[in-house]
Amino acid sequence: MNAARARASLRGWGGVGAMAVVCALALAFVLLLPLTQPHGGGDGAVGVGGPGVATGSPARADDCEDSKAQKETLSPSGADGPTIDAIKARTGARRKLIVGVDQNSYHWGYRNPNKEDAELEGFDIDLVHRIAQDILGDPNAVQFKAIPTSQRIPAIQDGRVDMVVRTMTITCDRLGQVAFSAPYFKTGQTVLASKSSPIKGYDKTLAGKKICTATGSTAYAKLDADQKAGRLVSSADIHHTVPNQLDCLVRLQLGEVDAVVTDGALAASQAAQDPTVALKGAAFTTEYYGVAMKKDADDLVRRVNRILVDYRASGWQSSYDKWLSATLGEDSTPSKPPAPEYLRNS
């Protein structure tokens, strides 16, 4: 570990950024405790330690092209069905929408240590409240579950959560395992590195560099595919993976890796937390975030898509202005998802 670099980097965080990471790490065990309790009470909770990260190559959705994956969703509907009926049937304190989120992504899903009870806030969290308002009539009728990047799909498949709203990119591989809503945000993979680094972007300057990504992320899948195809320099070391994407920023600050590859939206927020790092070069992919749900939860997928129609018209822009304009720019046009298409029939 380069202690001097670590100290200098930590001094550069300042205010909320430093407190955010320190508190996130310090609170991690406490905040994840609900996930370690046995299943019961109808809340869909089972232990994280049980089902592990899926291994092997996931099945791709039939006839799916990654460039069109965001279109493979169901048409909007306000009708209830078995999935929504089961959510509404929960009683008392358990009558809540159970949602997997992040708690460490600044301005996305972030547990703010400066607020009472360190409440969750951010762009993804705003959307969750809107969905809960529509389905249960109460924006606060939500049970948040902190889900590592690598556990997003297992948490849905195992019934730990009703949905995941966690900067999750829609891909064909994932469509073989879960269902997605229409996209609610547009982004792309970007390189994050120290401002003083000679790295210039996703190019030959990554030669011999250690690159960090989150396990199960589209970033790692892209690096792995590109290196095998010769599109990424062979000497780049891509085998530095972590359960949570924010852990990559910490490793970068400690000098354990040279660069991070992640969604540009997340990278911009991390650069806002630590002024000693910066985005290097332009985004080299186009990706779309969607709300992920069980493959057979057709009624819930259709309801979320109907909610998103209204949310894009009233709510999306104000949430962007509040949380993301400072890091992504006042012009939200590059981040707006395209007009939705609903090509999935069943």
Image (cartoon, helix red, strand yellow):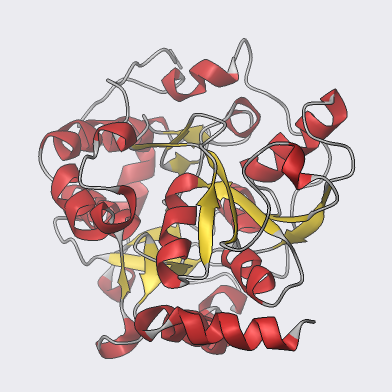
The residue most toward the right is 235
| Coordinates of residue 189 in the picture (x, y in percent) | 56, 40
Question: Can residue 89 be seen in the rendering of this structure?
Answer: no
5 shown above or below 60 = below
Which of the image's four quarters has the N terminus?
A: bottom right
| Coordinates of residue 102 in the picture (x, y in percent) | 47, 63
| Coordinates of residue 280 in the picture (x, y in percent) | 56, 48
The quarter of the displayed image where residue 306 is located: top left
Nearer to us in this view, 329 or 75: 329
The quarter of the displayed image where residue 93 is located: bottom left
137 shown above or below 169 = below
Q: How many tags in the picture?
A: 0
Nearer to us in this view, 181 or 196: 196
Residue at the location (54% across, 41% down)? 281
Say left or right for 213 vs 264: right
Nearer to us in this view, 92 or 172: 172
195 shown above or below 251 = above
| Coordinates of residue 123 in the picture (x, y in percent) | 30, 55
The quarter of the displayed image where residue 176 is located: top right
The residue most toward the left is 314
Residue at the location (68% across, 57% down)? 259
Question: Can residue 200 be seen in the rendering of this structure?
Answer: yes
